[in-house]
Image (cartoon, grey):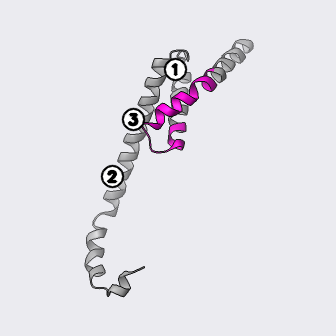
Amino acid sequence: MVMENVAAHEDWKVCFSELAPGLLLFARQWVRSVADAEDVVQEAFVRFWRRDLSIHNRALLYSAVRSAALDLIRRDSRRARREVEALGGSEQTVQPQFEQLDDSQREL
């Protein structure tokens, strides 16, 4: 049992080292930063590992990366929307006061 776990662990390491560069490039097409792409690829591998899926199914792995990237995009979109809602009408409140300032006071 222990030897099987060691062998399986080595398979994952080899597969990750072989596939990660291509998966990162693929993920980078969907997300804004390299760090986000790395997170997406890691998430895809974790999903595979938890579901005990074959890591040798490249098409499914790329699909998992795409799915994880879309999840991240949706999560970021919801967060941005909540932040805008939390700000409420702050721009409408500040704008009239800003317009009352002299030109010299408006400059930073």
Q: Which residues are magenta?
A: 15-38
- Mark closer to the observer (1, 2): 2
Quadrant of res 42: top right
Q: Position of residue 61 (x, y in %)?
A: 49, 22
Quadrant of res 1: top right
Residue 32 is one of the magenta-drawn residues: yes
Q: Position of residue 64 (x, y in %)?
A: 45, 26
Q: Identify the image quadrant of the C terminus.
A: bottom left
- Residue matched to label 3: 70
Q: Amino acid at mark 1?
A: Arg
- Mark closer to the observer (2, 3): 3
Q: Amino acid at mark 3?
A: Leu
- Residue matched to label 1: 51
Q: Which residue occupies 27% across, 85% down?
A: 100
Residue 34 is one of the magenta-drawn residues: yes
- Mark closer to the observer (1, 3): 3
Crowding at mark 2 (Cα within 10 Å: few <14, some 14-19, many 20+):
few
